[in-house]
Each structure stands twice: as C-alpha cells, then as structure tokens.
Amino acid sequence: MIKMAEENKLSGREKVQRLYDLIGNRGLYVNTNYDIFSSAPEKVNISPIYSVSLLPKNSRAFSSSLLFATLTSLLNHGTMLITGAPGIGKTTGAEVAGHFYTGVPLPQILEAELIGNPQLKTEDVTATLDTVAMVHEGRKKVIPTKFLQCPVKIGDEINRTPSDLLSSAMKLVDTGKAVYQGELLESPPGVLFATANYSDEGTFQLTPPFLDRFDVAVMVTSPPPWDLKKIRQRGDEKMNGHLEKLLQIPEELTLNEDDRERIRKEISSISENYIEDIGEVSSFADFIYSSLRFSEAASDNLVRATKGNAWQLTQDNALSGHFTNSPFNYTLNELSIRTVQAMVRYAKAFAWINGKGKVELEDLKCVLPYLLWHKIQPTSRALTEHPKYANDRIGFVEDLIGKIETEYTELAQGNILPTYAVALQAVRDSKLGNKEFDYEQVRNIVRNALVKIGNADKPYALTLASHIASEYNHKIMHENK
Amino acid sequence: MTSIQPLIPINKQGWNLEEIAEELLKPAPAPAGNAGSGNVQVSDNPDFWKVEGVEYRNGIYTVELAKALLDNGNTKTQDQWIEYSKQVKARNGFYTGDFQLYHSLFTALYKNRDKDSARQEVEEARKFLRETFRKKYPLTLTRIAYQPRGMDKIIHSKGMPDEFSLDVNFVDSDEWVKDAKNPAVYKALLGSDNIHEINNVYNWINGTDAYLYRLNSKPSSIDERVARFIADSVRADLDCDWFPRYSDSTLGVRVARSATM
C-alpha cells in the first residue's frame, strides 16, 4: 500500500500544472487570453492588422498573468507587478496564486495586504514599537508587521503611494531584510505581488529604480466574453457564494516547503545548450544587455558610452549619431544586472513548467517581453515610428528583441567571429594549433583583429573589440606580476 | 591559463583559424583611402598622368593613369579584364584597377586641383575622366558578392594576386552619396567614409552629385555584380549592380609603392 501511494505521488511539476488548471477550472482566475505559448504558434491573419495564434500539437498556451504569478510564487523573494484597468481581477489573481502555490490561507494573505495610499508609513510596511512593553517593562520591543511576516505579500494599487515611500518596502522584498529602529528584521522567503492601475488623477508615476525591482510584470486584460460564463458559474460571493470551498487545496496537490525547495532546485539545474562552453541562452541574454547598454550620446569614450551615463544628453535629445539603425537608439535606459539574472531564471522556470529538460532560446524569447517592458523606456523615435507602443509596451519590447536578434544573427553568420576567436585564443594561450606566438606576435594579432573587427562598423563589433583589448590588458597586467 | 571565453558561441567549423592567424600576423593595416596629402605631385607624360603620393590601402603609392582606355577602348567582361590585367601587369603595362584604387587616385587629383604646379594636368585628367564616365562606363576589378544572409562581400582586385575582400551590409536602397545612411558601406567600397569628400570628388569630375546603385534586397542565393563608373548630366553613379556577363571598357593604371604609412 505504501509503495502504491509512493508511485501515485505527483511530482512538484505535476502539482503545479494541476493547480494552474484547477484555478482556471474553478473559475477563480479565468482568462483564456492566451498570450504565451510553449512552442511558436501558427499565426493566422484575420484582418490587415490582426492575427490569431494556433497552438502546435503537444504544446501549451498560457495566460501571462497567471503563468508568471505561478512561476514567481515558486521562487525565493520573487517580485511581480500586475498592471491593468480597474476591476478585471489583478488583485484576485495575485491572492489566489499566492494562496494555492504557497499554501498560505487567503485570510492571512488579506490581513497582510498593503493598500496603496499617499499616507503610507514605514510602520505600515516593516514594524512598529510595542508601546505597552515600553511603558510597562521599560524596554524597546519591535513588532514586525503582518506584511513583513507573511510569505505572500501583496501591495495593492501600489502607485497610489509615492515611490520614495515604497523604497523601504521594496528593499525588504528584494533582500528579505529590513531595519527598524536599529533592529534587523527578516522576512520569510516568499513572493511579492504589486498591482497598479493605469495612471489616473490619484496615482503617482512609478520611478525607473522602483520598477526595476520587479522581476516580471504583466498587463492584465479584461477576460474575453466567452470566459464570463465560467466566472458566473463560480458563484457570486455577494449572493451566498461559496468561495471558501473553492479555495480548498486538494491534499494531493498541496505544495509544502520541501516541494518548493525541490522545484527551485529542479529549475536551477535545468541546463542550456553549450557550444564550446558558451551557453546559447545566457549569451543571447548578455547580447541583449550589451545591445541596449551602448549610448552614442553618452560619450566619445567607449568605456563611458553607456545609457547610464547619458544623464544630460540622451538618445532623445542628442543629434543623430553614427550608428543610426542600431537597436540601442530605441531605448533611453539600459538593463540592470538584476534584470539579466532574471532573464535566465525565468527562461529556466518556463522550460521547467513545460516539462523540458533543457532551456532553449525560444523559452527566453517567450518570457523576455514580460521581464523588460516595465523597465525599458522607449525613445521618442520608437514612439514616433509606432505610436501604439505608448500603450503596448510589450509589443514594443517584442519588436526591439526582433531587431536585436537580427543583429545577433548577422554577427553569428558574419566573418568577424573567427577573427575574434583567433584573437582571444592568441591572448589566452599564446598559441594556435602547433604554432606558438611570442609577445610581439600576440600584440600584432590583437591589433590587427581590433582593426578588422572595428571595420564591421557596428556597436556589437565595438563590444567584441573592447573585450579582446580588455582580456589582453588583463593578461599583460597578470604577466607583470 | 586564464578563463578567457568568447561572449557568444562560435561555430568554428569551416574556418581555418590558423590561416586567419597568419593573416592577422601581418603588419597592421593603416586606414585606407584618405588620399591627397600635401606631397602629391602630378606630372604629364605623353601617354599617362603620373600622380605621386597617393594614399591607398596601407601605403603611399605612385599611380599612373593612362590617357587612353585599355586595349584601345575595346570592351571585355570583368573576367576577361582580369586575364588581360594579369598578363600586362607581368610586363609592367597598364591594367585595370579596383574601386578603392581609382577612388584614391581621383581624390588625390581633386585635392590638388588648385595647386599651381599641377593645375593644367589635373584639369586634363578630370576632363578625360568625365568624358570616359559619360561615354564608356568603365568597369573595375571590384566585384560585390551579395549574400542571401549575413554581410555581403566586397572583393577588390578581383582575381589578381593582391585580391582582398571586405564584409559589410551592402544591400539597401539606392541613394545619393551625400545622404548616405551607412558610411561603412563607402569605407568598404571606396576606402573612405568621408561622405562629404566622396561626393565632392565626383561632383568635381562630373559636375553632379554622386549616386550609389546596388542590390536593393537580399538575393535568394549569392548574386555577384561588377562595380563600374557611369555618369550623365544628372548624376555620377557608383554602379555596383552591373552584370559580370556584360562587357565594357576600362581605365588603365599602373601602381608602384613609394612608402609605408
């Protein structure tokens, strides 16, 4: 009997997949606006502008809001921003996902929820002083807030609070630690969901550093009309509905901390394809980072020619530069290290939920728009070329990634990579095959390679050339010791 | 050994890395095509103009431009001019040059057009070039191999011992040179990305702005075209769209290296 029970035990992935389906089937979060596909769908044009997607066999389609709520709930200190119009289930989705994937009862999640308002204080976020203990016992005692203690943290309508007031909350979420009255407080591992309505007269602009702390963001769209029937079937809580019953987690699907830890291990251990020790997925993520990092407006010194240094003259107000068609012209800011780390993490998580043993470039491309759209600020050129990108920032990022991928393919198929490879190998080994190079020969190879690569006249060529120079200089310094 | 690794995966199959290393071991090339230093000397001879101090590729050259078209103005395909050039070059005769060499020569002439010692010779050469561009459409030993994917290949001195090629994204719409979208194209084609100067050179020769003709979209398979000069009263064309099977006349040059830059 015990053996039978063991055999019937579901894996962590199976539990997560079934919970995902169960949330939809129970009508708790219904949205069949499928916008993410485990395999590239067939696009069928149904008007001069619009197309619909048809799923290939043996593939899965997801609604981005529930998918990322699921994946983020499984990570340690995951952060997710949920935006959209009022009244379409942003908060409900977060509450339900938080409950089902962490096992925290919904009432506990609701008690800990922060409601955005302009008067929000540190005491609402991190802790308060126990005044009774101070008066009667004469000692300082810090009481952490329920928000801090709850593994599922929800900041509802977060943009009704000025960003600077939220910074302490975000630091807490990022690191799991907060300091109040000189006392270090630790929050349990968990997830933070923040919801934000689109701007209105009562909202504040969320600042780029604040937005950067969210690993992922989704734009929730209202459910399509064919989902309304399912939502009605759920029951109406205002008419003796039976929400408690719907929130019950079947025992066989319950995820405990061991399950979640194992899931994180499984996600973490998913590997990518390597070509001579270079990962395909992580190197493409790095190429995206590099492509958006460069700024001609920032400086004529290549070291300082980054978007982070374009603080006065930006890609928006500088005169047209030399590299007019490169992707970097379409963003005002660059990507943070936090974002680059999230890229591979979420690509692996997406591959994992789809039951794949390896993470591939397609997995990364599926999740990328949701990791970047809330962080990347389009230039006025981007919005002039496509005014709808002012609304559809996910579309903007998809287009931008397409441009970057074109350059990546151009680089991969062009002729400068062998030169780059030879120069790096000469620097690393001072030999190639049986031929050994002396100091002067290595330097000559490097110098010639730099010129040849530079002749490609592309920002990515500048990066490759700079890399060779950096490695060469590093080696020279090392040899000097 | 340090852990130096490339930034992106490199499929080394099909590449002879040792050959590439040999190439990279050669003395570093200097920027090409910034012709026309202050030391240019232009002198007249019965059969050619001699221009000393032309900056071309990685050195200073003396370039002689024949006053008559090669082979009495007969027309040949590029492949036939290659064979012809190989033979006459071996006998120190005039042969067909590539776009970079011609442009370096034209630029040197242009920059010295007002020099008292050379004014007459330079003007005679200009008239000859204008006439040839407008009536004979001289082709060159530059060939463009348009690629279906990735960068296109510009091959200079095609078929000659000093043949070399440069990779650039060449396919694009035709354009007035003064409105150039990508100076790298001109760097690869002419050896110079000084767009203003390039246009001035051809405007000086023909009295019109320069215009670039090329393939406007990626071919389905490698498509090779020949580069030649054409001009009329409207524009001076850098025609990179001409078919290798057609015949044209060509300008004769003879080159001797003077110094390394």
Image (tube, coloured by chain):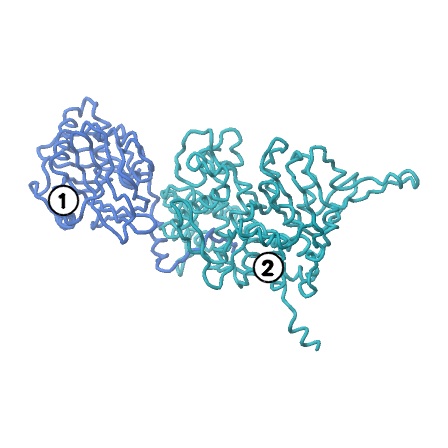
Q: In front here: A341 or B84?
A: A341
Q: Name the residue under label 1.
A: B92
Q: Does A127 sit left or right of A405 as displayed?
A: right
According to the rendering, which colour does chain A have? cyan
Q: How far apart are marks 1 and 2 (CA)?
A: 83 Å
Contact check, label 1 and label 2, Cβ < 8 Å: no
Figure check: B57 above or below A2: above
Q: In front here: B216 or B192?
A: B216
Element at label 1:
loop
Spot occupied by residue A254 in the image (x, y as percentages of width and height)? 69, 62
Q: In which quarter of the image is residue B93?
A: top left
**Mark nearer the viewer, 1 or 2:** 2
What residue appears at the point 54 percent right and 61 percent down from the top-left corner? A354
Q: Quadrant of residue B190?
A: top left
Q: Mark 2 points at which residue?
A: A21
Q: Is residue A435 visible?
A: yes
Classify the position of the N terminus of chain A by image quarter: bottom right
Spot occupied by residue A427 in the image (x, y as percentages of width and height)? 45, 51
Spot occupied by residue A93 in the image (x, y as percentages of width and height)? 63, 49
Kindly identify the amino acid type of the residue bearing the numbered disc 2: Asp
What residue appears at the point 53 percent right and 49 percent down from the top-left corner? A224
The disc numbered 1 marks a residue on which chain? Answer: B
Q: Are the residues under marks 1 and 2 on the same chain?
A: no
Q: Does B22 sit left or right of A308 as displayed?
A: left
Element at label 2:
helix
According to the rendering, which colour does chain B have? blue
The disc numbered 2 marks a residue on which chain? Answer: A
Q: Is residue B259 visible?
A: no
